[in-house]
Amino acid sequence: CGFVAIVGRPNVGKSTLLNRLLGQKVSITSKKPQTTRHRILGIHTEDIYQTIYVDTPGLHLDEQRAINRLMNRAASSSLGDVEMVIFVVDGTRWTEDDELVLRKLEHQKAPVVLAVNKIDNIKDKDEELLPHIQELATKYDFFNILPISAKQGKNVEQLITWSQQLLPQNVHFFP
Ligand code: GDP
């Protein structure tokens, strides 16, 4: 236990969000599973989406074993031991792949926050997409939906607050 997973298809802004959340520049360009640097335990790439596994500090784990276990579980389409999932989508571009991920996450035990990113790029706030995403999220029973801008930091504080409420009391993800 003690991991947070940031999930989403490529280019939705996962790395940008992670840098915001951790308040530091982290290197996560590698698509291959890798040893932790700055608390990133590994990146798992499926056909259509990637998962970044982030360590939560204060836990003493055999990292290599933990990574292998997570990777194996990820490979069998289950996020396994994560404490929380942040599902990132691009608020300006919803695709069928996003819905596939949404369906996969439906049976997650850990709480899922749906972060609708890039809202700074949504010119017309009444555009169709946000309501559409909201509708889908309701259909799949996600209650934690938050429009954000990882780039501008908009609502990122709110995401941190929610996460702290959703995580178990002994797990602290954020600095
Ligand atoms: P990842 O592949 O999911 O990790 O996505 P990245 O974090 O690498 O971001 C992909 C692209 O989207 C980059 O060019 C980012 O600058 C851009 N991006 C990320 N977040 C935002 C955002 O909130 N607003 C806008 N306008 N662009 C963003």
Image (tube, helix red, strand yellow):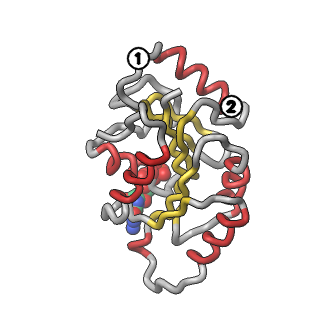
Q: Which type of secondary structure does the marked residue at label 1 adopt?
A: loop
Q: Nearer the viewer, residue 70 or 29?
A: 70
**Can you tell which of label 2 and label 1 is closer to the viewer?**
1
Where's the C terminus, which quadrant?
A: top left
Q: Nearer the viewer, residue 41 or 59?
A: 59
89 on left or right of 142 = left
- The quadrant holding residue 96 is bottom right
Identify the residue shown where x is 60% and y is 77%. 131
Check disc 2 and give the amino acid type: Ala
Please rate how many residues cluster around mark 1, counting C-alpha atoms within 10 Å: few if below 14, some from 14 to 19, many from 20.
few
Identify the residue shown where x is 67% and y is 48%. 105
Query: How many discs appear?
Result: 2
Identify the residue shown where x is 68% and y is 57%. 97
Name above or below for residue 101 compared with residue 2.
Answer: below
Disc 1 C-beta below 8 A from ligand 1: no
Q: Nearer the viewer, residue 107 or 46?
A: 107
Q: Nearer the viewer, residue 99 or 156?
A: 156
Give x and y (percent) for residue 29: 42, 40
From the image, tell me which residue sits under label 1: 60
